């Protein structure tokens, strides 16, 4: 397993926040077109939120496909009561479990539009909002030039194949070869538990429906300033994406970090984790380094918009939400 490149941890400056309601919170839109409309007095219509930052020449927009509550017993390494207690202490407990967001990230530089992950598309929880989120930006899926799939779990690729169709017909698809091999292996599918079967099925559909799929090997540049980071463990080919330009960077770490349990404890896992030893080893390397270098991080399942930093607080690692205030 390759070491994480030092370039992944250069600092980045968040520049702005836009959007509508945030699944229980609210953000003010930058324009009336994106403001929450009213059905009747005092009753806002939920709209797809988005948040934007600048990384050099890039505009990175955080979008969401929705959310789902993950049962407290989905976190091997801690008992369900321990996870629930931690969630209550962080004021994030729900009756049915830990609230997971499904965040996706759109990268634009005026030349290409690259989407990181395609969401669960209704296959889990209250999801399926990504097309509306793109529409709020004036975009349709066929205007996306590339989709990087960080790994082949259903909540990261469901939107690619919703309805048994190629929903991003203009896009090249990038997936780590190790994940493509694993999730299209009939023997592995036959031996997998029921909760992983949707991922195996979707993986086969992705390969069938996307002839422009590129199975990539290791860390490489996808486009100038956009490159792959190896974060193996959660799945055999779990990857992150680094965006960098003008001395600033952002690293999207996908399922490296889960709410409530991370980054404080690297020995707590998620039910879907493929290789717990590798996942813990990666977190053991990544979290302290991210804290020491002040890396700006985007994470799929952290509260929207999923951007923050790992910080050391009196010897304990914790998640610090990124400061969205406008800065010079």
Image (cartoon, helix red, strand yellow):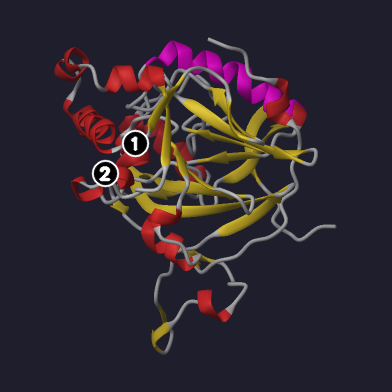
Q: Indicate whether residue 280 is drawn in magenta.
A: yes
Placement of 25 over or under 179, stated as above or below: below
Gap in Å between the C-alphas at discs 1 and 2? 29 Å
Find residue 272 and report its image quarter.
top left
Q: Residue at x 65, y 29 (%)?
A: 317
Find residue 283 and report its image quarter.
top right
* Magenta region, residue range: 275-292
**Residue 250 in view in this figure:** yes
* Residue most extreme to the right: 328
Placement of 288 over or under 297, stated as above or below: above
The disc, 1 or 2, on the residue closer to the chain's N-terminal end is 1
Numbered mark located on residue 59 in the image: none
Element class at badge 1: helix
Identify the residue under disc 2. 161
Q: Residue at x 43, y 41 (%)?
A: 117
Identify the residue under disc 1. 72
Instruction: Mark 1 vs mark 2: give the one in front.
Output: 2
Q: Residue at x 14, y 17 (%)?
A: 190
Give the quarter of the figure containing the C terminus.
Answer: bottom right
Dominant SS of magenta comes to helix
Horizontally, residue 117 falls left or right of residue 286, namely left
Please state which of residues 316 and 246 is positioned toward the viewer in this rendering: 246
Horizontally, residue 258 falls left or right of residue 129, namely right
Placement of 2 over or under 259, stated as above or below: above
Q: Indicate whether residue 317 is drawn in magenta.
A: no
Check if mark 1's residue and mark 2's residue have beta carbons within 8 Å: no
Q: Residue at x 53, y 30 (%)?
A: 240
Crowding around mark 2 (Cα neighbors within 10 Å: few <14, some 14 to 19, many 20+) is many
x%, y% of residue 21?
48, 68
Please state which of residues 142 and 201 is positioned toward the viewer in this rendering: 142
Element class at badge 2: helix
């Amino acid at each position: 397993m390759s070491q994480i490149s030092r370039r992944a941890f250069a600092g980045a400056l968040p520049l702005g926040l836009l959007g509508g309601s945030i699944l229980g919170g609210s953000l003010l839109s930058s324009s009336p077109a994106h403001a929450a409309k009213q059905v009747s007095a005092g009753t806002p219509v939920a709209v797809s939120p988005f948040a934007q930052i600048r990384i050099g020449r890039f505009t990175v927009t955080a979008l969401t496909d929705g959310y789902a509550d993950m049962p407290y017993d989905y976190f091997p390494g801690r008992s369900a009561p321990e996870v629930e207690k931690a969630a209550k202490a962080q004021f994030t407990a729900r009756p049915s479990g830990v609230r997971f967001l499904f965040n996706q990230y759109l990268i634009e530089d005026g030349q290409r539009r690259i989407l990181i992950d395609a969401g669960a598309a209704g296959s889990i929880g209250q999801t399926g909002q990504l097309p509306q989120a793109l529409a709020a930006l004036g975009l349709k899926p066929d205007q996306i030039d590339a989709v990087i799939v960080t790994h082949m779990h259903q909540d990261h690729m469901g939107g690619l194949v919703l309805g048994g169709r190629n929903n991003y017909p203009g896009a090249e698809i990038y997936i780590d070869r190790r994940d493509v091999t694993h999730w299209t292996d009939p023997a592995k599918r036959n031996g997998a538990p029921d909760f992983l079967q949707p991922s195996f099925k979707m993986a086969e559909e992705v390969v069938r429906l996307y002839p422009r799929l590129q199975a990539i090997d290791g860390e490489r540049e996808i486009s100038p300033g956009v490159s792959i980071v190896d974060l193996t463990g959660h799945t055999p080919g779990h990857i992150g994406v680094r965006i960098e330009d003008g001395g600033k960077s952002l690293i999207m770490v996908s399922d490296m970090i889960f709410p409530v349990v991370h980054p404080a404890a690297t020995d707590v896992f998620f039910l879907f984790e493929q290789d717990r030893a590798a996942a813990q080893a990666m977190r053991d390397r990544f979290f302290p380094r991210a804290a020491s270098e002040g890396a700006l991080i985007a994470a799929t399942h952290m509260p929207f918009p999923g951007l923050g930093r790992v910080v050391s607080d009196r010897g304990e690692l914790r998640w610090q939400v990124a400061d969205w205030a406008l800065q010079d």
